[in-house]
Image (spheres, rainbow, N blue to C red):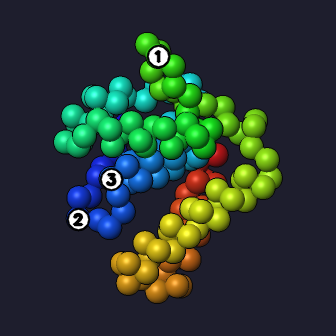
Amino acid sequence: MIVEVDPASAVPPYEQIRAQLATMISTGTLPVGAQLPPIRQLAADLGIAANTVARSYRELESQGLVTSRVRHGTTVADQAARLTEAEIRSRLDEAAHTYAALARQLGVSDAAAADAVHAALAVRAAAR
């Protein structure tokens, strides 16, 4: 699993980790039941505080994306069966706002940002 934290980013490190893991879960890169690295291990690998990773995991758990059990670690939850249409729409809207903010920060045109989304969707569809 490859997670990166950009210390120069305006996005807090815990949110960078949460967003990357959420994306990996939603795209199937991390399938249901996959074990996430222990908090201390991921923190050491990224060179950040364990509390930062712990907050990311808590956020993911509150979203229903992962489940955490003492001595069993954190695993990807089967959230698709529990999501309502409103929750799906909310997550999609949140991801779209995050992407739009990143596109603005990078100075990318609306057309180029939309093209990137269409290309990503095409790749995902071709992989099925």
Q: Is residue 125 left or right of residue 104?
A: right
Location of residue 37 (image quadrant):
top left
Residue 124 in the image: state x and y as whole percent.
58, 54
- Residue 79's disc is none
Q: Quadrant of the N terminus?
A: top left
The residue lying toward the viewer, choosing from 82 and 29, is 82
- Examine the rendered structure and indicate whether residue 8 appears above or below residue 51: below
Residue at (58%, 40%) from the top-left corner?
A: 62
- Residue 13's disc is 3
Residue 6 in the image: state x and y as whole percent.
26, 58
How busy is the neighbourhood of tag 3: few (under 14 within 10 Å), some, or many (20 plus)? many
How busy is the neighbourhood of tag 1: few (under 14 within 10 Å), some, or many (20 plus)? few
The number of numbered discs placed on residues in the rendered structure image is 3
Element carrying mark 3: helix
Location of residue 33 (image quadrant):
top right
Element carrying mark 2: loop
How busy is the neighbourhood of tag 2: few (under 14 within 10 Å), some, or many (20 plus)? few
Report the Cα–Cα distance between label 1 and label 3: 24 Å
In the image, what residue type sits under mark 3? Answer: Pro
Write down the residue under mark 1. 70
Write down the residue under mark 2. 8
Q: Is residue 50 left or right of residue 116?
A: left
Circles 1 and 3: CB distance less than 8 Å?
A: no
Element carrying mark 1: loop
Residue at (25%, 40%) from the top-left corner?
A: 49
In the image, what residue type sits under mark 1? Answer: Val
Q: Is residue 42 left or right of residue 63?
A: left
Q: Residue furthest top?
A: 71
